[in-house]
Amino acid sequence: MRLRIQLTGWDRRTLTLTDTPDPDCPRCDGEGGLAYDYGDHNGEYAGTEWDPCSCWDETRRWTLLRIPRFPRRRRADRDPWSNEPPF
């Protein structure tokens, strides 16, 4: 297992420990899988498929630490360049 620490999430930030692909894997050359393009019935490009390699399990992850959210200070909506005192 080759582990790394990763920061995940947008609304609730979390540090997770995740598995990484084997850099010496002869099947995927350390990429973690094989990507190949495919076409439609006219021969035009229709997309790319991804087949994960067996050297890496992308679902293997553990939560280490949930980063707390600190509440922002609410300030009165006022013009910072105004000379008037806030009411």
Image (cartoon, rainbow, N blue to C red):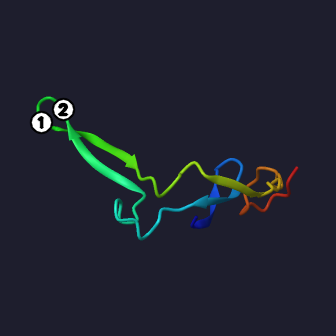
- In the image, which disc is placed on residue 51? none
- Quick one: SS at disc 1? loop
CB under 8 Å between callouts 1 and 2?
Answer: yes
How many circles with numbers are drawn on the protein? 2
In x, y percent, where is residue 38?
Answer: 22, 40
Task: Residue lying at the far right in this picture: please name it.
Answer: 87
Tell me the residue at 71%/49% (across/down).
12
Kind of residue sitting beneath label 1: Gly
Kindly identify which residue carries mark 2: 40
| Residue visible at 14% across and 29% down in the picture | 41
Task: Identify the residue under disc 1.
Answer: 43
Observer-nearest residue: 5 or 29?
A: 29
Q: Position of residue 20 (x, y in %)?
A: 53, 62
Q: Residue at 47% across / 65% down in the picture?
A: 22
Identify the residue at image location x=45%, y=53%.
Answer: 54
Question: As drawn, is 25 to the left or to the right of 12?
Answer: left
As measured in the structure, the alpha-carbon distance from the residue carrying label 1 to the one carrying label 2 is 5 Å
Quadrant in which the N terminus appears: bottom right
Q: Residue 34 at x, y = what percent?
A: 34, 53
Instruction: Please give left or right for residue 86 compared with residue 36 in the image.
Output: right
Residue with the most extreme bottom position: 24
Amino acid at circle 2: Asp
